[in-house]
Image (spheres, helix red, strand yellow):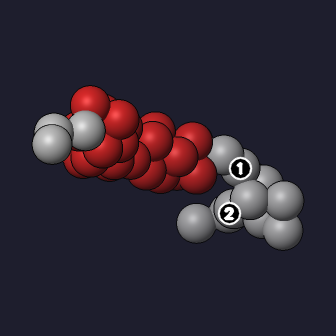
């Protein structure tokens, strides 16, 4: 018996998780680190 919930779960994990990780990495790259907000070099 094919489970549509299982298929949607796999589809969500295979598509949404990489998108979320990429957006989170982009946010981390754009964020200014509080310990060095204005580096001299």
Residue at image location 68% in from the left, 63% down from the top: 40
Nearest to the observer: residue 2 or residue 40: 2
Picture quarter with the C terminus: bottom right
Secondary structure, mark 2, is: loop
Left or right: 41 in relation to 19: right
Nearest to the observer: residue 13 or residue 5: 5
- Reading the image, the residue beneath label 2 is 40
Q: Give whichever of discs 2 and 1 has the lower sequence position.
A: 1
Pointer 2 local density, CA inside 10 Å: few below 14, some 14–19, many at least 20: few
User: Is residue 10 in sight in this rendering?
Assistant: yes
Q: Which mark is residue 32?
A: 1
Residue at image location 26% in from the left, 31% down from the top: 4
User: Is residue 22 in sight in this rendering?
Assistant: no
Nearest to the observer: residue 29 or residue 36: 29
Picture quarter with the N terminus: top left
Secondary structure, mark 1, is: loop
């Amino acid at each position: 018996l094919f489970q549509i919930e299982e298929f949607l779960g796999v589809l969500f994990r295979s598509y949404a998780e990489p998108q979320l990780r990429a957006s989170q990495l982009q946010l981390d790259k754009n964020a200014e680190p509080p310990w060095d907000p204005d580096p001299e070099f």
